[in-house]
């Protein structure tokens, strides 16, 4: 919609059995392919907290991590008697990668809208509101609405707007912390 070249790819793995899915999204004026080189990711948008950890090798110290704070423990973990990282372990691990780590209560927010399926739209709103994607609000909302049935347009608009507000707050909190550190 804004004239950029767009490339996407997904790795599905065991998604149908509760495993992870990684999606790659690149856009710009000259994009060769969809895969992002290790250490070159601008933003990791993780819909489940441990997914951010799985993506750490694509990040650099400048990468922004926007992480839904929900943890979903795969059934295999219990079956194998393994421990799964809690949110504090995940936060501490990611802080070793980048200082730009933000946890969002996107699942909780989606439940207030009585539709847990809008969590991803909330996260996209946070991405936009935090100014970590150089696209226009109208383009993003048009793209979202283009892919869903009309009966879900209103709740997705609300979810996107709430996400934007969360992203703005996140950015303001970051700026306030930066001023306190400098002063």
Image: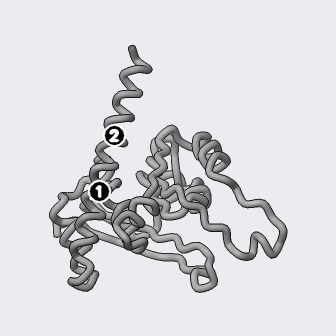
- Residue 37 in view of the camera: yes
Res 145 → quadrant: bottom left
Q: For this view, does 137 lie left or right of residue 183?
A: left
Residue 116 pos. (x, y %): 42, 71
The residue shown at (62%, 79%) is: 18
The residue shown at (33%, 40%) is: 171
Q: For this view, does 116 lie left or right of residue 49?
A: left
Question: Does residue 64 sit above or below 54 in this rendering?
Answer: above
Question: Does residue 134 sit above or below 76 in this rendering?
Answer: above
The numbered dot on residue 171 is: 2
| Quarter of the figure with the C terminus | top left
Which mark sits nearer the N-terminus, 2 or 1?
A: 1
Q: For this view, does 3 lie left or right of residue 178?
A: left
The numbered dot on residue 68 is: none
Q: In what element is the residue under mark 2?
A: helix
- Mark 2 or 1: in front is 1
Q: Which residue is mark 1?
A: 162
């Amino acid at each position: 919609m804004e004239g950029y070249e767009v490339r996407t790819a997904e790795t599905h793995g065991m998604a149908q059995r509760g495993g992870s899915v990684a999606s790659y999204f690149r856009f710009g004026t000259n994009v060769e392919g969809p895969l992002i080189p290790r250490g070159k990711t601008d933003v990791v948008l993780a819909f489940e907290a441990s997914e951010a950890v799985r993506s750490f090798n694509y990040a650099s110290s400048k990468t922004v991590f926007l992480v839904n704070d929900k943890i979903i423990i795969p059934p295999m973990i219990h079956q194998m008697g393994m421990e799964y990282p809690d949110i504090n372990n995940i936060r501490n691990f990611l802080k070793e990668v980048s200082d730009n780590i933000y946890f969002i209560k996107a699942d909780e927010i989606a439940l207030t809208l009585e539709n847990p399926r809008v969590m991803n739209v909330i996260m996209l709103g946070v991405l936009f509101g935090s100014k970590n994607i150089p696209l226009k609000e109208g383009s993003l909302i048009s793209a979202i609405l283009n892919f869903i049935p009309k009966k879900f347009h209103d709740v997705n608009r609300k979810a996107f707007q709430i996400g934007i507000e969360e992203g703005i707050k996140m950015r303001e909190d970051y700026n306030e912390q930066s001023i306190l550190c400098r002063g």
